[in-house]
Image: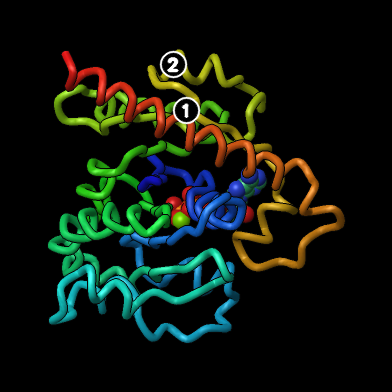
Amino acid sequence: MAVICLTSASGSPGVTTTAVGLAFCWPRPVLLVEADPTGGSGILAGFLRGTTPYDAGLIELALSPLGVADALREVVRPLSPSVSLVAGTRTHAQAAALNDVWEPLAVALKELEANGQDVIVDGGRLGLAGSPQQLLDAADVTLLVTRATLPSISAARSWAETVRQPASGWPHPGLLLIGEGQPYRDSDVAKVLGMPVVADLPDDPTAAAVYQRGATPPRRFETGPYVRGLQAAAQSVQAHVARGRFTLIEESAQ
Ligand SMILES: Nc1ncnc2c1ncn2[C@@H]1O[C@H](COP(=O)(O)OP(=O)(O)OP(=O)(O)O)[C@@H](O)[C@H]1O
Ligand SMILES: [Mg+2]
């Protein structure tokens, strides 16, 4: 159905954790792409607790003699029957080699949609060397993840101005707010940052640790507020994608 990118302005608000959590709560098969150029694959070391060797990932995709679409099949690893992963780079030094891969990868990811697979991208922090700019710009939806605290909102503010520019910004920008009401509410944050809060998640460190570092799920995890929040977020993100497409159709008909 769509390519969904998550990114942040600063302060580790929970992009990687939310990307993994959303992938596991997504109602359709999903490919998770770790496009954070920081290196060291936070997902292999975190969610998978280092139990899986780094044998292939984005850098192998970038260096493959095959086209990106064919190479993609070679570097994907299954995490569950419905979630698969393209791991990020081993080190930040590989980031420069990724610059030429983002554009063809954006095209290849869009084509997956035809096979009934959605894509969730961990875009890391905005503005890093090797940042997946073309993916963020080409996604159906790119969401700026922020906490509801003043430092997080303040850091997001200048990037929010940039990414919502109609000419140069993301097609359908939105916010994913973590810790709604602590202390600021969705409506306050949307007003200050000039973008809609597409989804929010509770501040729940114990539950988040399951997707962040592969912690043992606490009791009633599957029916608890965090997983319910992720399921609701998945629905809201899909509705945002559908609205964006409808707007596009309307605009092109005018
Ligand atoms: N909904 C949540 N509630 C509470 N804690 C959370 C939540 N989501 C993530 N966290 C915690 O926030 C911390 C940072 O998470 P994570 O590594 O996913 O952030 P990030 O934005 O990807 O950071 P970086 O920019 O460094 O990659 C981790 O300790 C994680 O467990
Ligand atoms: Mg991260």
- Mark 1 surroundings within 10 Å by alpha-carbon count, few (fewer than 14), some (14 through 19), many (20 or more): many
Residue 123 place in picture, x, y as percent: 36, 52
Q: Secondary structure at mark 2?
A: helix
In primary-sequence order, the first of circles 1 and 2 is 1
Side (left or right) of 9 relative to 148? left
Looking at the image, can residue 223 be seen?
A: yes
48 over 193 or under it: above or below: below
Residue at 57 percent across and 29 percent down: it is: 148
Residue at 24 percent across and 72 percent down: it is: 93
Q: Label 2: which residue?
A: 192
The amino acid type found where label 2 is placed reads Val
Residue at 85 percent across and 53 percent down: it is: 220
Q: Residue furthest right?
A: 219
The amino acid type found where label 1 is placed reads Ile
Residue 22 place in picture, x, y as percent: 56, 50
Among the 4 quarters of the image, the one containing residue 9: top left
